[in-house]
Amino acid sequence: MNIAFGVRNFRMVGGAERFTLRLAAYLINRGHRLVVYAIKGEPMDGVELRLVPAPRLCPHYRRAWETGRRIAARLANADADVTFGEQKIWNAAVVRPGGGIEATYWEQKLERRWKSPRLARLARWLYAKRRYDLRAERLSLLGSATRFIIVNSDLVRRDLVRWYPEAAGRVQVVHNGTPAKVYDPGQAARQRADFRKAHGMADSARVALFMGRDFHRKGLASAIAALAVADRAEPAADWQLVVAGRGNPRPYQSQIAKAGLGGRVRFLGDVAEPALAYAAADVLLFPSYYDPFANVTVEALAEGLPVITTAANGGCEVIRNGCNGWVVDSPLAVERMAEHLAALADAPRLAAMKRDARASAEACRLEDRLRDVEQILQAAAGK
């Protein structure tokens, strides 16, 4: 097939961009021809990259709209069998809103800002960016060119149908995946020992890993609270929390001190080699308020870590309670998370769940997910 992509960044920036790059490489290896229209990008073998001029002197609230409009114009005239667009880019036959539904994002953002659903509804018209974002989303999801909408979880599918019921028949769910990994017990043991020694953690300690940016939305305060409860219930476990990802630790220092966890919570910032942090940990603790499908969910499973997360993370759809992790109702379920942490103080239970995590990652292979997307592109081309 001749395929045209429309994306803002054809380079490694975040999770959505990483998926696009991997999809492009997969399609090229499968023998398809690919043209990419992007505002910014880096060359890739086999890809014809056409950079679209970025808007100049454009206010921040209109930037996503203007870049989307320029890329959409290229897609409308692309000589391709099928077109693929990312979030808030229209005129594509296949659209993938990898960051979830903008309408939900803005609803949650305004409720956090105004502390009340009623005030949030009244204040929503004050935000020009919201108006442009929702206009772009509507064109993307409901445009006449759109044949399929790929969402990465059933959580996002329900959101989409709630806001755009007329698009329900176009939706396809394709979970995020993770590259296949050959587990090397010796290497993992060395990485675990080296990382823990470098950061002053005893080999016998139980280590929970929190990984991600936007500490508030991903529930770091709840993770700290759950760790404190688990530590009080099972002091011998010597629970530690490793926080990996860019963010400001200062708002959490008083909570850590009041919980008596001084020295047990380590902020590492961005980690160059996440595999080392996974190897050093015993569980991924990720009490997110909202994530369409957090990549760390399947990455942790592939590294042999059970996952404790919330129903507000679309990644929870690959978690089986008591086998490869647990799903709690919300980040406020601190006691439940603490109970699950306490269960992992039992060494045989932890070892069994680590084995189950690695086994369950086989069903989350990235190559399988990319093949699913290829089949959707082929179906759209056929239409």
Image: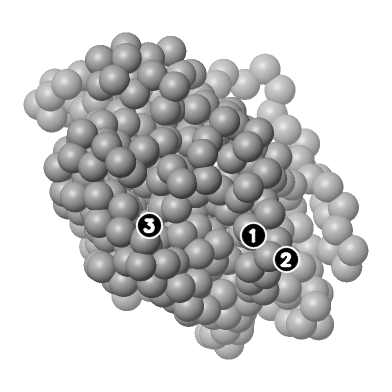
224 or 341, which is in the foreground?
341
Q: In this view, does 48 lie to the left or right of 134?
A: right
Amino acid type, callout 2: Ala
Q: Where is residue 358 in the image (x, y as percent from the top left)?
A: 50, 72
Measure how far apart labels 3 and 1 are at the Cα level. Answer: 18 Å
Determine the secondary structure under disc 3: strand
First in residue order: circle 2 vs circle 1: 2
The residue lying toward the viewer, choosing from 180 and 173, is 180
Return the residue at label 1.
188
Q: Which residue is drawn at 31% across and 31% down?
A: 224
Marks 2 and 1: which is nearer the front? 1
Q: Which residue is drawn at 49% across and 27% down?
A: 266
Indicate whether 330 appears above or below 220: below
Coloration mode: one colour
Task: Tell me where residue 110 sits by quadrant.
Answer: top left
Depth check, front residue: 235 or 340: 235
Q: Which residue is at 42% across, 28% downward?
A: 264
Disc 1 residue type?
Ala
As displayed, is residue 119 above or below residue 177?
above
- Residue 63 lies, in percent from the top left, at 58, 29
Q: Are marks 2 and 1 in contact (CB under 8 Å)?
A: no
- State how far apart marks 3 and 2 are (Cα): 29 Å
Q: In the rendered image, which residue does mark 2 sit on?
A: 24
Task: Assess disc 2: are there few (<14), some (14-19) or many (≥20) residues with their C-alpha within 10 Å of its C-alpha.
Answer: many
First in residue order: circle 3 vs circle 1: 1
Query: Is 264 above or below relative to 348?
Result: above
User: Which amino acid does the dot numbered 3 rest on?
Assistant: Val
- Tell me whether circle 3 and circle 1 mark residues in contact (CB < 8 Å): no
- Is any part of residue 220 visible from this angle? yes
Residue position for label 3:
307
Residue 121 x/y as whole percent: 17, 28
Q: Quadrant of the N terminus?
A: bottom right
